[in-house]
Amino acid sequence: MIRMKKLLIVDDEVDIAASIQYLLTQEGFATILAHDGNKAMQMYENEKPDLIILDLMMPGIDGYEVCRRIRANDKRTPILMLTARTSEIDTVVGLELGANDYIAKPVRLRELVARVKAHLRESPQVQDHGKGIRLGDLAIDTESRTVTVGDRLIDLTFKEFELLLAMARQPNRVFSRDQLFAQVWGSDFLGESRTVDVHIRYLREKLEANPSQPKHILTVRGVGYRLVWD
């Protein structure tokens, strides 16, 4: 018997939470609700959900703090932020605390369902064998430091390889520029996170069929990038 994926929905706006719960239940997920941060932490610890949909702006313990506490010991459970705030810094703060993705309010419910499924996908095409990663027809070998798409060998520089590897380890996740910069260049590097944009452009030129309309290395406006490779 296949176990239903369990989703924890956290939002102090009861009507919004109920709408999200109804739709996700119709999609075949088991859902549990919390309307404040304290209850969210209690349900997370007791229920061990497979994914968390987390509103950021709540009274008491807000979503930022809930995310921080969960990420102190759990790096794997996907966290999707819900935010009514539109400024770039608010979204980036959530991502820096460890959230995997964000959905702006008012929530487009079908988009939310698609994001949930993407983060929960357990596809046989996605394999990590220790020495490398296979994602669809994209293969990254960390021992030989080679990248192939199908039977085509892709010639990457050292930093291009590291940047692609960082995103491929967590496909579908939204990475801020600062997160990618810190992972690939390190905090001691004398530069700025906009160098990430330059290297993303180089990767698209080498990996995308149409670099001006990428299908794999996607821009998340005002935040950063995500790798999608089915």
Image (cartoon, rainbow, N blue to C red):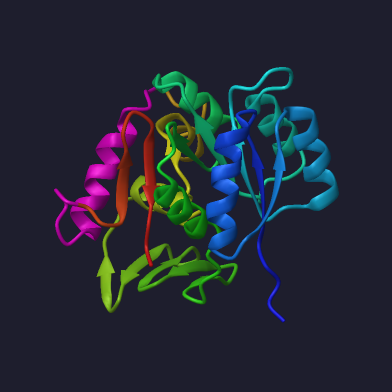
Residue 8 vs 182, above or below: the answer is below
Q: Residue at coordinates 73% horizontally, 18% vertically from top-left?
A: 60
Expressed as whole percent of the image width and height from the top left, the position of residue 135 reads 43, 68
Q: Is residue 203 magenta?
A: yes
Q: Is residue 198 magenta?
A: yes
In the image, 167 versus 163, the foreground residue is 167
Image quarter hosting the N terminus: bottom right
Residue 35 vs 49, above or below: the answer is above
Image quarter hosting the C terminus: bottom left
User: How many numbered discs, if any?
Assistant: 0
Q: Residue at coordinates 46% horizontally, 75% vertically from top-left?
A: 125
Question: Residue extending furthest front?
Answer: 15
Expressed as whole percent of the image width and height from the top left, the position of residue 28 reads 59, 66
Q: Residue at coordinates 73% horizontally, 45% vertically from top-left?
A: 74
Q: In this view of the protein, can residue 162 be seen by the observer?
A: no
Tell me which segment is drawn in magenta: 191-213
Residue 186 vs 161, above or below: the answer is above
Expressed as whole percent of the image width and height from the top left, the position of residue 34 reads 72, 37
Left/right placement of residue 30 relative to residue 16 reads right
In the image, 225 versus 51, the foreground residue is 51
Expressed as whole percent of the image width and height from the top left, the position of residue 158 reads 37, 49
Left/right placement of residue 94 relative to residue 226 reads right
Q: Quadrant of residue 122?
A: bottom right
